[in-house]
Amino acid sequence: GENVEQHPSTLSVQEGDSAVIKCTYSDSASNYFPWYKQELGKRPQLIIDIRSNVGEKKDQRIAVTLNKTAKHFSLHITETQPEDSAVYFCAATLQGGYGNKLVFGAGTILRVKS
Amino acid sequence: SQTIHQWPATLVQPVGSPLSLECTVEGTSNPNLYWYRQAAGRGLQLLFYSVGIGQISSEVPQNLSASRPQDRQFILSSKKLLLSDSGFYLCAWNRSPYGTGRDTEAFFGQGTRLTVV
Protein backbone atom coordinates (compact mmCIF):
# COMPACT_ATOMS: atom_id res chain seq x y z
CA GLY A 1 0.00 0.00 0.00
CA GLU A 2 0.93 3.66 0.12
CA ASN A 3 3.47 4.33 2.81
CA VAL A 4 6.76 5.86 3.84
CA GLU A 5 9.35 3.61 5.43
CA GLN A 6 12.00 5.10 7.72
CA HIS A 7 15.20 3.61 9.15
CA PRO A 8 16.71 3.30 11.66
CA SER A 9 14.17 3.60 14.45
CA THR A 10 16.88 4.69 16.90
CA LEU A 11 20.32 6.13 16.28
CA SER A 12 23.05 6.96 18.78
CA VAL A 13 26.08 8.95 17.72
CA GLN A 14 28.96 10.63 19.46
CA GLU A 15 29.00 14.40 19.47
CA GLY A 16 30.75 15.64 16.35
CA ASP A 17 29.98 12.55 14.29
CA SER A 18 27.53 12.46 11.40
CA ALA A 19 24.03 10.98 11.45
CA VAL A 20 22.14 9.59 8.47
CA ILE A 21 18.46 8.69 8.37
CA LYS A 22 16.93 6.99 5.33
CA CYS A 23 13.41 6.83 3.96
CA THR A 24 11.70 5.13 1.05
CA TYR A 25 8.33 5.88 -0.49
CA SER A 26 5.95 3.95 -2.68
CA ASP A 27 4.22 6.55 -4.87
CA SER A 28 6.25 7.45 -7.95
CA ALA A 29 4.14 10.63 -8.30
CA SER A 30 5.34 11.99 -4.96
CA ASN A 31 7.01 15.35 -5.45
CA TYR A 32 7.57 16.87 -2.01
CA PHE A 33 9.71 15.41 0.78
CA PRO A 34 9.98 17.32 4.06
CA TRP A 35 11.89 16.41 7.21
CA TYR A 36 10.60 17.32 10.65
CA LYS A 37 12.23 17.47 14.08
CA GLN A 38 10.15 16.86 17.20
CA GLU A 39 11.52 17.64 20.62
CA LEU A 40 9.99 15.99 23.66
CA GLY A 41 6.44 17.17 24.29
CA LYS A 42 6.47 19.61 21.40
CA ARG A 43 4.98 19.77 17.95
CA PRO A 44 7.02 18.66 14.90
CA GLN A 45 8.76 21.47 13.06
CA LEU A 46 10.18 21.53 9.56
CA ILE A 47 13.97 21.49 9.34
CA ILE A 48 14.50 20.98 5.61
CA ASP A 49 12.56 19.87 2.55
CA ILE A 50 13.29 18.86 -1.03
CA ARG A 51 11.23 18.70 -4.19
CA SER A 52 11.37 16.08 -6.89
CA ASN A 53 13.17 18.30 -9.38
CA VAL A 54 16.21 18.58 -7.07
CA GLY A 55 18.69 15.88 -6.11
CA GLU A 56 20.29 17.48 -3.08
CA LYS A 57 19.72 20.42 -0.77
CA LYS A 58 21.89 21.72 2.02
CA ASP A 59 21.33 24.09 4.94
CA GLN A 60 24.38 24.51 7.18
CA ARG A 61 24.89 21.16 8.96
CA ILE A 62 21.81 19.55 7.46
CA ALA A 63 21.47 18.10 3.98
CA VAL A 64 18.88 16.01 2.21
CA THR A 65 19.41 13.83 -0.87
CA LEU A 66 16.73 12.40 -3.14
CA ASN A 67 16.95 9.48 -5.55
CA LYS A 68 13.71 9.49 -7.55
CA THR A 69 14.56 6.37 -9.50
CA ALA A 70 15.07 4.33 -6.37
CA LYS A 71 12.33 6.24 -4.51
CA HIS A 72 14.41 6.99 -1.47
CA PHE A 73 15.65 10.09 0.29
CA SER A 74 18.01 10.66 3.19
CA LEU A 75 18.74 13.21 5.90
CA HIS A 76 22.37 13.92 6.75
CA ILE A 77 23.38 15.81 9.87
CA THR A 78 27.09 16.62 10.19
CA GLU A 79 29.03 17.68 13.28
CA THR A 80 26.18 16.58 15.53
CA GLN A 81 25.57 18.43 18.77
CA PRO A 82 23.62 17.43 21.91
CA GLU A 83 20.78 19.78 20.92
CA ASP A 84 20.27 17.70 17.79
CA SER A 85 18.86 14.95 20.02
CA ALA A 86 15.18 14.58 19.10
CA VAL A 87 12.82 12.49 17.02
CA TYR A 88 13.15 13.03 13.27
CA PHE A 89 10.39 12.26 10.79
CA CYS A 90 10.55 12.05 7.04
CA ALA A 91 7.38 12.59 5.02
CA ALA A 92 6.16 12.48 1.46
CA THR A 93 3.11 13.71 -0.34
CA LEU A 94 1.18 10.74 -1.68
CA GLN A 95 -1.75 10.78 -4.03
CA GLY A 96 -5.05 10.21 -2.29
CA GLY A 97 -8.65 10.05 -3.35
CA TYR A 98 -9.11 13.75 -2.60
CA GLY A 99 -5.73 15.02 -3.70
CA ASN A 100 -2.29 14.93 -2.13
CA LYS A 101 -1.87 13.87 1.47
CA LEU A 102 1.19 14.17 3.68
CA VAL A 103 2.29 10.82 5.08
CA PHE A 104 5.03 10.44 7.67
CA GLY A 105 7.57 7.77 8.39
CA ALA A 106 7.65 6.06 11.79
CA GLY A 107 10.34 8.36 13.13
CA THR A 108 13.97 8.04 14.25
CA ILE A 109 15.03 8.76 17.81
CA LEU A 110 18.44 10.43 17.54
CA ARG A 111 20.63 10.57 20.61
CA VAL A 112 23.82 12.58 20.49
CA LYS A 113 26.20 11.61 23.28
CA SER A 114 28.60 14.20 24.59
CA SER B 1 0.70 35.46 8.98
CA GLN B 2 -0.90 32.07 9.36
CA THR B 3 -1.59 30.45 12.71
CA ILE B 4 -3.14 27.20 13.79
CA HIS B 5 -5.04 26.73 17.02
CA GLN B 6 -5.81 23.37 18.55
CA TRP B 7 -7.57 22.71 21.82
CA PRO B 8 -7.71 21.49 24.45
CA ALA B 9 -4.04 20.86 25.25
CA THR B 10 -4.79 17.97 27.60
CA LEU B 11 -7.88 15.89 28.17
CA VAL B 12 -8.75 13.01 30.47
CA GLN B 13 -11.93 11.20 29.51
CA PRO B 14 -13.63 8.02 30.77
CA VAL B 15 -14.15 5.06 28.50
CA GLY B 16 -17.43 5.35 26.64
CA SER B 17 -17.59 9.14 26.79
CA PRO B 18 -17.75 11.32 23.65
CA LEU B 19 -14.86 13.33 22.23
CA SER B 20 -14.56 16.57 20.35
CA LEU B 21 -11.21 18.13 19.45
CA GLU B 22 -11.17 21.34 17.48
CA CYS B 23 -8.62 22.87 15.17
CA THR B 24 -8.81 26.21 13.39
CA VAL B 25 -6.45 27.92 10.98
CA GLU B 26 -6.15 31.66 10.48
CA GLY B 27 -4.54 33.71 7.77
CA THR B 28 -5.04 31.42 4.80
CA SER B 29 -7.88 30.07 2.71
CA ASN B 30 -8.70 26.59 1.44
CA PRO B 31 -6.00 24.82 3.43
CA ASN B 32 -5.46 21.08 3.44
CA LEU B 33 -6.24 19.93 6.98
CA TYR B 34 -4.95 16.83 8.75
CA TRP B 35 -5.48 14.89 11.95
CA TYR B 36 -2.59 12.70 13.11
CA ARG B 37 -2.27 10.50 16.17
CA GLN B 38 1.01 9.79 17.89
CA ALA B 39 1.16 6.94 20.40
CA ALA B 40 3.90 7.20 23.02
CA GLY B 41 7.31 6.89 21.37
CA ARG B 42 5.77 6.14 17.99
CA GLY B 43 5.30 7.81 14.63
CA LEU B 44 2.67 10.13 13.24
CA GLN B 45 -0.26 8.10 12.02
CA LEU B 46 -2.49 9.91 9.53
CA LEU B 47 -6.12 9.59 10.64
CA PHE B 48 -7.99 12.01 8.37
CA TYR B 49 -7.18 14.59 5.77
CA SER B 50 -9.36 17.11 3.99
CA VAL B 51 -8.73 19.20 0.91
CA GLY B 52 -11.98 21.16 1.24
CA ILE B 53 -15.41 21.28 2.85
CA GLY B 54 -17.14 17.97 2.28
CA GLN B 55 -13.93 16.29 1.15
CA ILE B 56 -12.62 14.23 4.03
CA SER B 57 -10.72 11.01 3.65
CA SER B 58 -10.49 8.49 6.48
CA GLU B 59 -7.15 6.75 6.37
CA VAL B 60 -7.51 4.00 8.95
CA PRO B 61 -10.48 2.09 10.35
CA GLN B 62 -11.12 3.38 13.80
CA ASN B 63 -13.49 4.69 16.40
CA LEU B 64 -13.15 8.30 15.28
CA SER B 65 -14.74 10.62 12.74
CA ALA B 66 -13.84 14.04 11.35
CA SER B 67 -15.86 16.96 10.09
CA ARG B 68 -15.07 20.26 8.42
CA PRO B 69 -17.98 22.60 9.08
CA GLN B 70 -16.08 25.64 7.80
CA ASP B 71 -13.17 26.12 5.44
CA ARG B 72 -10.63 26.58 8.22
CA GLN B 73 -12.13 24.41 10.94
CA PHE B 74 -11.47 20.72 11.42
CA ILE B 75 -13.07 18.67 14.19
CA LEU B 76 -12.16 15.21 15.43
CA SER B 77 -14.95 13.34 17.19
CA SER B 78 -15.89 10.08 18.78
CA LYS B 79 -19.24 8.92 20.14
CA LYS B 80 -17.70 6.44 22.59
CA LEU B 81 -14.01 6.51 23.51
CA LEU B 82 -11.96 3.35 23.91
CA LEU B 83 -8.83 2.91 26.00
CA SER B 84 -6.88 2.48 22.76
CA ASP B 85 -7.87 6.01 21.69
CA SER B 86 -5.36 7.45 24.16
CA GLY B 87 -2.52 9.33 22.50
CA PHE B 88 -1.20 12.65 21.31
CA TYR B 89 -3.42 14.13 18.60
CA LEU B 90 -1.99 16.66 16.22
CA CYS B 91 -3.81 18.86 13.75
CA ALA B 92 -1.87 20.26 10.81
CA TRP B 93 -2.38 22.29 7.69
CA ASN B 94 -0.63 22.92 4.41
CA ARG B 95 -1.56 24.03 0.92
CA SER B 96 -1.52 22.41 -2.48
CA PRO B 97 -1.93 25.36 -4.83
CA TYR B 98 -4.06 24.10 -7.70
CA GLY B 99 -2.15 23.32 -10.85
CA THR B 100 1.26 23.98 -9.40
CA GLY B 101 2.01 20.56 -7.95
CA ARG B 102 3.91 22.37 -5.23
CA ASP B 103 2.72 21.30 -1.83
CA THR B 104 3.81 23.61 0.94
CA GLU B 105 5.29 23.01 4.35
CA ALA B 106 2.87 21.62 6.92
CA PHE B 107 2.38 23.45 10.20
CA PHE B 108 1.22 21.66 13.31
CA GLY B 109 -0.99 22.70 16.16
CA GLN B 110 0.25 22.35 19.73
CA GLY B 111 -1.35 18.94 20.07
CA THR B 112 -3.88 17.42 22.46
CA ARG B 113 -2.78 14.76 24.89
CA LEU B 114 -5.80 12.50 25.37
CA THR B 115 -5.89 9.97 28.17
CA VAL B 116 -8.83 7.60 28.25
CA VAL B 117 -9.34 6.06 31.69
Image (spheres, coloured by chain):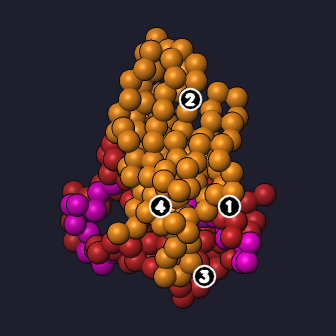
Chain colours: A orange, B red
State how many labels appear.
Answer: 4
Q: Where is residue A102 in the image (x, y as percent from the top left)?
A: 52, 63
Mark-to-mark CA distance, 3 and 4? 18 Å
- Report which residue position mark 2 lands on: A77
Element at badge 3? strand
| Residue type indicated by callout 1 | Thr
Tell me the tag on residue B52.
3
Indicate which label's residue lies in the foreground, 1 or 3. Answer: 1
| The N terminus of chain A: image quadrant | bottom left
Disc 3 chain ID: B
**Magenta residue span:** B77-100
The three-letter code of the residue at mark 3 reads: Gly
Which label belongs to residue A10?
A: none
Q: Position of residue B115 (x, y in %)?
A: 30, 54
Nearer to us in this view, B85 or A100: A100
In this rendering, do the residues under marks 1 and 2 share a single chain? Answer: no
| Residue A5 in view, yes or no | yes
Q: Where is residue B61 in the image (x, y as percent from the top left)?
A: 29, 75
Q: Nearer the viewer, mark 1 or mark 2?
A: 2
Q: Do labels 3 and 4 share a chain?
A: no
